[in-house]
Image (cartoon, grey):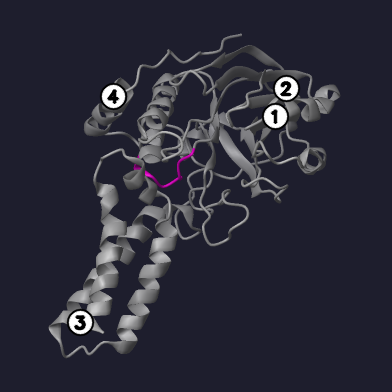
Amino acid sequence: MLFIFALLNGLLLLATFITLWRYEAWWVRGWDFPRLQVAVVAAAVLLLQLMLLDFSESASLVLVGLTVLCLVYQLWWIAAYTPFFPIEVKLAPGDDANNTISIMTANVLTTNKNAAGLLREVHQWRPDILVTLETNAWWQQQLDVLGADYPYTIKCPLENLYGMHVYSRLPLEDPAIQFLIEPNIPSMHALAILPSGQQVRVHFLHPAPPSPSENEESTERDAELLVVAKSVVDAELPVIVAGDLNDVAWSATTRLFRKISGLLDPRVGRGMFNSFHADYWCVRWPLDHLFHSDHFTLKDIRRLPSFGSDHFPMLITLVYSPAQSVKQDGSESSASEEAWADEKIAAQPAREVHQPKA
């Protein structure tokens, strides 16, 4: 029994602490994702240990202590995305339609042909901006029926799983499609104009993940996120960054992005809102994100029903409430974190991020 639990503890320790290694290979960075699942396994192992081990033996105490260490460490990373943590973004103080912006993000899965399912969600929720990922020419043809209601568009149909489209009710000024790091991975940048006339910088991203079939390391993804973070940190206008970032909310890289950019995460203190994988409830994590400057408060955040993709759509509604900004604090970066971000950016040649202007 001791041998079996020692073996389980060894696996838990490896899965838990391998992420302390800053090596960027996919087989290391991949362990950033399943922290909740590893925590559940650690809790189950702990329960079995308490039931089956003989605590007159010191080895049993050591095993339990190591399991508790793994469990606590995993929970420390994901705690911010539970209702037990203080919320980071305040609820909107009222209903100000002229200063409200709703954004739906949907990774459609290129091979998925249920465009009608996505259009049904768009017609039901009527977001101000629809951002689609993995959209190719076929998907563009299906989504172009939205043209009457969404006259402002940015389109980049691709067949490589990284096509991107933006359909907007709100005017989009000075739009740009950029390939910031990789020549086949687009990002989109524009100035959205609220009904009140307030300008909002919007940046939509979909960097490639670290994986054996994509990039063997996370350097490209990390560099794209951080170069955008650097570009918005001193922005005078309100900022929104959204998309499928192919990284979990609690990873070291996403935390670094939030600290460098100064942007807030409306999920903190509210829940994980796991958006991937739509088909397997036991292996889900939050890959689809929206971060924003402290000019906004939250009206609503929800995960929408599946429409055949491996991602659930996400819908977030914000209210421009600059008076509330003093009550909302994000994370601040340290000198060492700034240096780490610079190191990651330097590892990949990057274009200067388009800063849209009226």
Category of crowding for the residue at label 2, using alpha-carbon neighbours closer than 10 angstroms: few (below 14), some (14–19), many (at least 20): some
Q: Main secondary structure of the magenta part?
A: loop
Kindly report which numbered mark, 1 or 2, lies closer to the viewer in this rendering: 1
Q: Is residue 333 above or below residue 283?
A: above
Helix or strand or loop: what does disc 3 sit on?
helix
Residue that mark 3 sits on: 60
Whether residue 264 is visible: yes
Mark closest to the chain's N terminus, 1 or 3: 3
- Specify the amino acid type for callout 3: Ser
> How many residues crowd around disc 4 within 10 Å: few (fewer than 14), some, or many (20 or more)?
some
| Gap in angstroms between the C-alphas marked 1 and 3 | 56 Å
Identify the secondary structure beneath mark 2: loop
Relative to residue 4, is residue 182 depicted above or below?
above
- In the rendered image, which residue does mark 4 sit on? 342
Residue range highlighted in magenta: 246-252
Residue type at tag 2: Leu
The disc labelled 1 sits on which kind of residue?
Ile
- What percent of the width, then of the height, locates residue 253? 37, 38
Q: Which residue is mark 1?
A: 129
Is 192 covered by the magenta stretch?
no
Instruction: Tell which tag, 2 or 4, sits nearer the viewer.
Output: 4
Identify the image quadrant of the N terminus.
Answer: bottom left
> What's the mark number on residue 154?
none
Which residue is identified by label 2?
A: 170
Q: Is 126 on the left-hand or right-hand side of 16?
A: right
